[in-house]
Amino acid sequence: MSARGPIAALAVSSALSLAACHLFEDRDDSTPADHEAELDPADYAEQVDAKLRRISACRDIVASVIVESWERYADQVDDEGKPARKREGVYLRGINSNVFRSCRRVLEAAKTPPQMPKIEAEVTNVVEAGSRYAELTRELATYLEQEGWRDDGWETLSALDPQLRQTHGRWAAADDELQRAIDQRHIENDSILLGVLERRRSSLEVASRRVMIRARPLVRCMTGAARSEGPVETCANRYAAFDEAVASFDETYARDPGAASKVFWMQTFAKDVEEFHELANAFQRRLTQRKPRSSDVQELTDLYSSLVRDAETLDFDFP
């Protein structure tokens, strides 16, 4: 073994020792239960990551539907609760309660370790506010389908409008708090997780996971900058970290195509990494020039959601 081998092993061992202190110290989120404190820090880091990814996935499903619904509504209804373009009228699909199914499953499994009471409380807030918003969209959709506006001159829309705006605001605030809580826990865990993966997993799996770890904060930054009322943030540092992770993945993927071909869904994942990288690059350039359009943000989040699904489908032990 080269001198580098023992040094790298020592570095990982030291990192995990520090991880034990960090992961199990008192935090705003939770104090680990006794059985969690007995876990190997490496196992604990992987469990934290798995649970965070499940929570993020449920959050992304809810957010994509509500954001699309609200943008459609805000485009068609003015601030006084009247159709913005009377000749066109208003069209809005009601949001089905099944949109919140994955988040409800997350909450049902709240007692499953590792416990994250703060994050799970934020999930509850998102589901409650989002469900109420969804109820209002279904009520409005029924009114529009039955053409009730012909009889009341859009009075029902005007009555529902303040409730829709207030409830959407509650959901948006809860969603923001949930994202902040998830991101903070990832910041605590991700560097430890990468050290664990480098010791336990193949170089291709590590490179794949690093891409996703760098993609998440990039998307958060880009979508936040695009919707911000203040100065546009360029997200340059986050993009540079993601760009570096993609370069490492591409190199690892090309180095051993035979090994890559044995990983279930890897070819699709690699194609989506390339496509998302190109889109993120264009989005980053756009941020330095002007505020992106809502359609640009939707395209970015849709492709990111597809990439997340690909990453969750990867199976490095197949068959």
Image (tube, grey):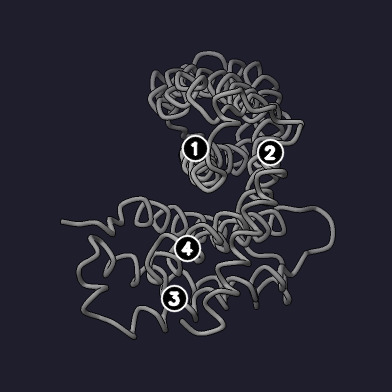
> Does residue 156 appear to the left or right of 30 in the view shown?
left
Residue drawn at (51%, 22%), measured in percent from left and top? 110
**Nearer the observer, 290 or 271:** 271
Place of residue 180 in the rendered image (x, y in percent of width and height, measured from the top left): 70, 42
* Residue wearing tag 2: 181
Give the Cα separation between the discs numbered 2 and 4.
Answer: 28 Å
Disc number lying in front (3 or 4): 4
Residue drawn at (48%, 65%), measured in percent from left and top? 198
In the rendered image, which quarter is residue 162 located in?
top right
* Residue wearing tag 3: 249
| Residues tagged 2 and 3 counted as in contact (Cβ below 8 A) | no
Q: Tag 4: Cα neighbours inside 10 Å, few (<14), some, or many (≥20)?
A: some
Please name the amino acid that badge 2 sits on: Ala
Residue drawn at (71%, 24%), measured in percent from left and top? 166
29 shown above or below 111? below
Give the Cα separation between the discs numbered 2 and 3.
Answer: 28 Å
* Residue wearing tag 4: 199
Disc number lying in front (2 or 1): 1
| Residues tagged 2 and 4 counted as in contact (Cβ below 8 A) | no
Please name the amino acid that badge 3 sits on: Phe
90 shown above or below 183? above
Q: Tag 1: Cα neighbours inside 10 Å, few (<14), some, or many (≥20)?
A: some
Please name the amino acid that badge 1 sits on: Lys
